[in-house]
Image (cartoon, rainbow, N blue to C red):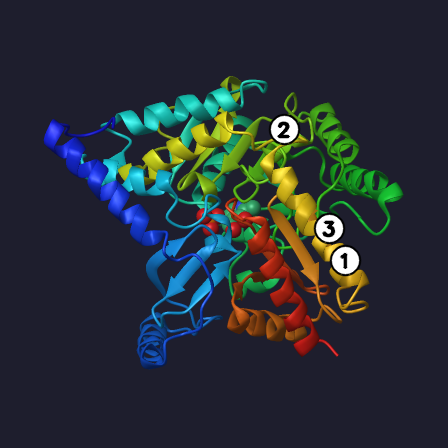
Amino acid sequence: MAIGVQSPDINEHFNKLFTAILLEQQKFDKIKPADEDKKEILAQKLKEYEGLKGRGFFYPFMASGRGHGPFVEMIDGSVKFDLINAIGVNLLGHSHPLYIKANLEAATSDTMMCGNLLSYQEPYELSKLLLDAVKESRMKHFWFSCSGSFSNDTALKILWQKKAPNYRLIAFQKSFAGRSVAMQDVTYNQSYREGMPQTIQVDHVPHYNYRNPDRAIEETISALDKLIETNGNVYCGLTIELIQGEAGFIFGTKEYYKAICEWAKKHGIYIWIDEVQSFTRTHQMFAYQMFDLDQYVDIVTIGKVLQGAGTFYTEELNPKPGLIAGTFNGSIASLNAGKATVRYLKEGNFYGEKGRIKELETKFKAKFKSLSEGSCKGKIPYYGGVGTMLSFEVGDASVDLTNKFMKKLFENGIITFSAGKEPTRVRFLLPLPLLDEHIDEIFSILEKTVLEIVN
Ligand SMILES: Cc1ncc(COP(=O)(O)O)c(C=O)c1O
């Protein structure tokens, strides 16, 4: 135990508490329907909360705080497979020993939140680990924020200051960058910014055309060339979400991304990779590493699995004092969990062709193959993705049918979320602790649900 107060007495209680919590949480190890007497409690609380929020929820879901591995319990007593993980946050699954430990250790500290002005050991140690993980690149600094959107705002401000007055940004069609005032302009989906004024200048170019891969590089590069022809070289940066989450996990090839990066470098345009969702989830800790882009990246943003967020940047891009600041680094518990997660993933056998993440992907794809060619022939027109970021289509892949399917899947015991429009895909952000028997059960529920919903 490394932080806050320590004594033999605290250590003894800590160990007992840690074990007791883990043993209790481990009881949630299979899916189960709601308890009759608790259904009404869930309905009431959700109705009230919807009133407070001013908006309905997609799923009738409220967690009890109990769950283990891929399983999460709701307050109606039902237990489900959580294959979306708070949209990508809980890679280690529910009540992972490292999360329990991080929370208990944080309780021995004297504060909840850690700030930029008066630092603590947690952000220092986590920064060292993170920067060590990117040491093949030119990035030398890391700045914490409390959301992916804010880490992206930081990246943009750094680029603006460096390239002032060239404030225009290049982004990709179908990408998602967050909900801040700036990021809603970087995000491609116009329906997320209804009634908003245009605040920053962003030009969106086509992303990898998986329907015509032979022409993908040419299509994107000619759109990029056209931007310079039309506007002149007024660009500060090019932002790339390598694995496009909101698009249903669309991604290019090493050659494709290299060609784009070469183009950007040729024009003196900085390369900013948004890994808020992909961080730790592909065949390497960073997706840019999987695509061999180490030499090109200037700025990388991360979030979600970190249990926090932040921005990496090169020495050259280190901004002037005053530009980036803010009260919080994050909570002591989150920074502590981030540190434990990064260390665990770095030291364990998770990455590379023989790593756990590739193994999970292979198992899921094999199952999808047999389902889509077997009992669900013609009903699963697409499955794909990379690492723990997988997606599939059902039926005509329309928004309506996909939503109906996901709600039925939820009732049957699996939580997922959608991505994209025409086609709309069902998205998995898988947790790591999935056993073969879990995968078998997941696919038998998927089969049942496809047959129930898709004609
Ligand atoms: C690629 C990407 N960038 C940025 C964000 C925004 O992160 P946050 O919701 O933590 O602000 C997200 C969130 O889903 C994302 O997927």
Does the CB distance between marks 1 and 2 fall below 8 Å?
A: no
Dividing the picture into quarters, in which one does residue 216 lie?
top right
Q: Mark 2 — residue?
A: 289
Q: Mark 3 — residue?
A: 366
Q: Nearer the viewer, residue 109 or 373?
A: 373
Q: Is residue 21 left or right of residue 400?
A: left
**Which quadrant holds the N terminus?**
top left
**Which quadrant holds the C terminus?**
bottom right
- Residue 103 drawn at (x, y percent): 28, 41
- Looking at the image, which residue is at 85% across and 44% down? 213
Name the residue type under label 2: Gln
Does the CB distance between marks 1 and 3 fall below 8 Å?
A: yes
Q: Residues within 10 Å of mark 2 (few under 14, many from 20)?
A: some
Dividing the picture into quarters, in which one does residue 297 lie?
top right
Q: Earlier in the sequence, mark 1 or mark 2?
A: 2
> Residue extending furthest right?
214
Q: Earlier in the sequence, mark 3 or mark 2?
A: 2
- Looking at the image, which residue is at 69% across and 32% down? 233
Q: Mark 1 — residue?
A: 370
Q: Is residue 331 visible?
A: no
Mark toward the viewer: 1 or 2 = 1
